[in-house]
Structures are given as C-alpha cells and as structure tokens.
Amino acid sequence: MAVRLLRTYSITKPLGVGVLTSASKKGKVTPEDLAVAVENMVTLNKVGEALVLIEG
C-alpha cells in the first residue's frame, strides 16, 4: 500500500495585501486602498497576540 502525504497551506492575510504594500512604496496606491491593507494586518495581529497569551 502506498502512503500519500498531503501538504496543506494556510493563508495568514488576504491575497493582494502584499501587492498593495509594495505598490504603496512606489506611490502607486490610493490612501483608501492602503488603509484596507493596514486594517487587515492590524486585525490579524490582534488575533495572534490573543493566541500567544493563552496559557497551555
């Protein structure tokens, strides 16, 4: 019997956030679009912070 290993991936932020942050470094993104990227990153950091504080 052959054993098949499956690889799983998890996405930690919405696709496109990295594109927006890179574009902002070149001045090619609107402040409104950059604000969406920043809001997503801040929200994800809050979840990570809460998980670290769980004693286990």
Image (spheres, rainbow, N blue to C red):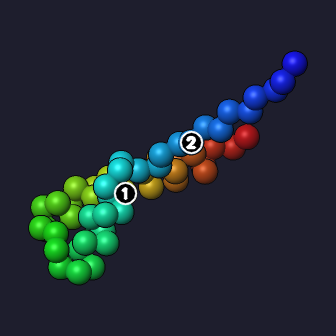
Disc count in the image?
Answer: 2
Mark closer to the chain start, 2 or 1: 2
* Residue 41 horizontal/vertical position (percent): 37, 57
Q: Measure how far apart labels 2 and 1 are at the Cα level.
A: 19 Å
Regarding mark 2 in the picture, which secondary structure is present there? loop
Q: Which of the two residues, 17 or 44, is positioned nearer the viewer here?
A: 17
* Residue 50 horizontal/vertical position (percent): 52, 47
Q: Which residue is mark 1?
A: 41
Residue at 61%, 51% in the rendered image: 52
Residue at 36%, 48% in the rendered image: 14
**Dot 1, crowdedness within 10 Å: few (<14), some or many (≥20)?**
some
Residue at 23%, 81% in the rendered image: 26
Regarding mark 1 in the picture, which secondary structure is present there? helix
Residue at 61%, 37% in the rendered image: 8
Question: Which amino acid, by three-letter code, is at mark 2?
Answer: Tyr
Kindly identify which numbered label has been placed on residue 9: 2
Where does the C terminus fall, quadrant-wise? top right
